Image (cartoon, grey):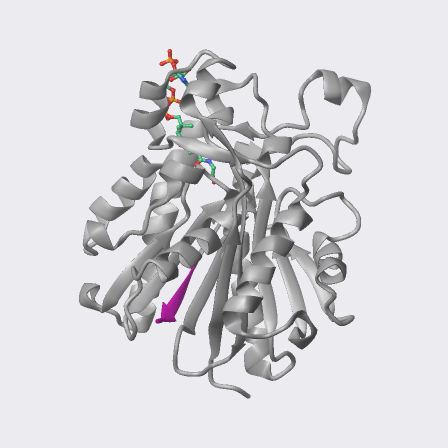
Amino acid sequence: MIARSSILGTGSYLPEKRITNADLERMVDTSDEWIMTRTGIRERRMAAPGQTTSDLAVEASRRALASAGIGAKDLDMIIVATLTPDALLPATACLVQHKLGARFVGSFDVVAACSGFVYSLSIADLFIRSGAARHVLVVGADVLSRVVDYTDRGTCVLFGDGSGAVIMGPGNGRAEVLYTKLHADGSGAQKLYIPAGGSALPASRETVDGRMHFIKLAGREIFRFAVTATAEAIREAMADLMLSPADIGAVIPHQANIRIIDSVAERLPIARDRYFLNLDRYGNTSAASIPIALDEAAGCGFLNPGKHVILAAFGEGLTWGSAVLRW
Ligand code: UT7
């Protein structure tokens, strides 16, 4: 058994095309003022036509491999967290394995929506600590623009496309994973979901005409859940590890809405300026949100060596959870 796993490198990739609030004003009945005050989002990115989730995942993965100083052939496992796979079959992770030129290593997707990265990191951590895998690529990637209804102002302003990745390996005293905790409550499954395209409601003329292949969201209910779940996840992690607010160098929350993060910060004793934010530039990129933020936070010096970093996620399922790293 290996005592701990470490994050050896990070990477992220955002498609070039920007969708500003002004662009959305031309598509639906909304305003920059409403979007800014209700969400804090200024703009989000959109994948180019034909650019898929695996394409985005591969770009972030190459950057993470370079940052870790290893090659694709050194990988022992590939995990892709996504709710927008290239297709229902095969797993997007298999496409990433092939495009990267990795060996024939175990490659699979994790479907936990916006919590998908924390779920995947937890799996990778256990594989590494058991000794079953040495280097694991964990990617969060989503092309939400393909499942967002651009006639629904209640959802289309929120989401964007992007990808973030980490390379994990045996602990080396830096960026070590100290803790992960996962939760789910399926009774809330229909608060945020895509009704059609699965075995319950296969694609048909009716599902297409009824716009049932797009994300449906009970905004206010998800908002309340998000605040409670995120605050609880952070509180639980701090209690389990007996951490005081002074131990926490950074919180990297799922980037969904500035008001959610503000409400979480009000409920917890951690200083507001320790919460890393980039949602104004990318919106909610689901599984990609936390790894993109982690990559940017690591790159801009927001993470202090020796201090604890809490990753806090919530999402569809409903799912939520946390991971604690010592940077
Ligand atoms: O990863 C998880 C993903 N999901 C989320 O994070 C969503 C969590 N929920 C939220 O972020 C917020 O609930 C929203 C941003 C979606 C909505 O904000 P809200 O403050 O909860 O607004 P609301 O849904 O209560 O709607 C207030 C008003 C409504 O009009 P009426 O009924 O008061 O006349 C909406 O029709 O705002 C209207 N509205 C809009 N107006 C302009 C809803 N969307 C828009 C819009 N532009 N884009």
Ligand 1 found in image quarter: top left
**Is residue 326 located in the magenta-colored stretch of the structure?**
yes
Which residue is located at x 68 percent, y 50 percent? 54
Residue found at the very far bottom of the displayed protein? 1
256 left or right of 68 in image: left
176 left or right of 80 in image: left
In which quadrant of the rendered image does the N terminus lie? bottom right
Q: Is residue 50 above or below residue 183?
A: above
The magenta segment: 322-327
Which residue is located at x 39 percent, y 77 percent? 174
Residue 13, x across and y down, in percent = 53, 50
- Place residue 35 in its image quadrant: top left
Q: Is residue 320 above or below residue 149?
A: below
Residue 121, x across and y down, in percent = 53, 64
Which residue is located at x 21 percent, y 51 percent? 273
Specify the principal SS of the magenta part: strand
**301 or 247, which lies in front?**
301
Residue 94, x across and y down, in percent = 75, 58
Which residue is located at x 32 percent, y 57 percent? 251
- Place residue 299 in its image quadrant: bottom left
